[in-house]
Image (cartoon, helix red, strand yellow):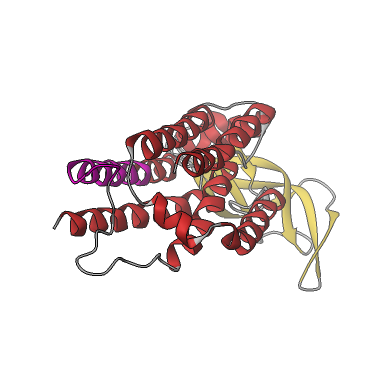
């Protein structure tokens, strides 16, 4: 019965961690709701980990706990677990790095204020163009993209206001009635509005680089984890798995300044890189101690 409980809690832990990492590696909106979702998923994962540890400790025997205690013949090492570990480990590092991706400097602070005030992205029609449209060098489906200063009407909570949006981009020469994407907070007229380039993928190059590295690390990392070694590591030991969990929690703590404060670009990436190293440090500790 204890073996069943440890296996069930172990599967719940893996499922919760997997969902949390998927949410972490995707470029979600910087809204407070998205941040709350990630923290809620992390909290759920933490609860599942603690449940697994508690059940394992209660079921322990001399030398540790076998999470798959056999009823009959000895259980053979799992073939899927090394593959799963090879995927989840790079995803953990990738999710940490994604937290550093986003608008930086003054623009980043402004975007953060807009989302904190309940703002978002809106499509609004152009009323008139106040500058000469200039090509951006981008071509979309055979049509050149242009940038220009345009006048639009933004609907704030107190009243509608005409606002000049600098550098608004349109596919084709902007004309009256064409739509542009503007980010602003209806409840904070003082923040004004600005053109929103491309949704949540403003830092697409960095995101693409992270995803490519994660993909190749997962593709080539499966051969690094032997079935016997992974099977041996499934035996819970507080001095092994407990320390590894603390190292991973340290990585989460390193990401908190960027989640709640507008950190400088170099500081955000430095903290994210340090957090991205913690899964591998935890793995090194487990390999050394098992």
Q: Position of residue 26 (x, y in %)?
A: 53, 53
Work out whether residue 28 can be spotted.
no
Q: Position of residue 241 (x, y in %)?
A: 38, 40
In this view, the residue farthest toward the bottom is 142
Q: Quadrant of the C terminus?
A: top left
Horizontal side, residue 95 vs residue 106: left or right: left
Q: Is 210 situated above or below 82?
A: above
Task: Residue at 32% x, 52% y: name it.
Answer: 13
Q: Residue 57: within the magenta?
A: yes
Most common SS among magenta residues:
helix
Q: Nearer the viewer, residue 209 or 153?
A: 209
Q: Residue 62: within the magenta?
A: yes
**Total labels drawn:** 0
Q: Quadrant of residue 162?
A: top right
Task: Residue at 54% x, 44% y: name it.
Answer: 154
Q: Nearer the viewer, residue 5 or 276?
A: 5
Work out whether residue 217 can be spotted.
yes
Q: Position of residue 131 (x, y in %)?
A: 81, 46
Q: Position of residue 133 (x, y in %)?
A: 83, 53
Magenta segment, which residues? 41-64
């Amino acid at each position: 019965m204890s073996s069943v409980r440890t296996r069930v809690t172990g599967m719940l832990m893996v499922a919760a961690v997997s969902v949390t990492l998927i949410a972490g590696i995707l470029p979600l909106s910087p809204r407070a709701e998205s941040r709350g979702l990630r923290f809620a998923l992390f909290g759920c994962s933490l609860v599942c980990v603690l449940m697994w540890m508690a059940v394992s400790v209660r079921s322990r025997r001399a030398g540790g706990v076998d999470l798959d205690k056999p009823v009959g013949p000895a259980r053979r090492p799992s073939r899927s677990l090394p593959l799963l570990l090879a995927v989840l480990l790079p995803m953990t590092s990738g999710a940490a790095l994604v937290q550093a991706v986003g608008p930086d400097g003054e623009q980043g602070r402004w975007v953060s204020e807009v989302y904190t005030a309940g703002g978002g992205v809106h499509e609004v029609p152009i009323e008139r163009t106040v500058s000469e449209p200039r090509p951006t060098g981008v071509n979309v489906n055979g049509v050149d993209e242009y940038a220009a200063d345009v006048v639009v009407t933004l609907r704030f909570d107190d009243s509608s206001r005409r606002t000049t949006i600098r550098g608004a981009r349109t596919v084709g020469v902007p004309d009256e009635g064409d739509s542009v994407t503007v980010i602003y907070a209806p409840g904070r007229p003082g923040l004004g509005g600005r053109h929103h380039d491309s949704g949540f993928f403003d830092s697409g190059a960095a995101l693409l680089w992270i995803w490519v590295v994660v993909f190749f690390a997962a593709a080539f990392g499966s051969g690094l984890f032997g079935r016997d070694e992974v099977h041996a590591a499934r035996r819970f030991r507080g001095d092994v798995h407990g320390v590894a969990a603390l190292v991973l929690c340290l990585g989460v703590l390193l990401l908190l300044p960027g989640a709640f404060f507008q950190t400088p670009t170099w500081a955000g990436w430095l903290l994210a890189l340090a957090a991205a190293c913690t899964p591998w440090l935890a793995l090194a500790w487990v390999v050394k101690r098992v």
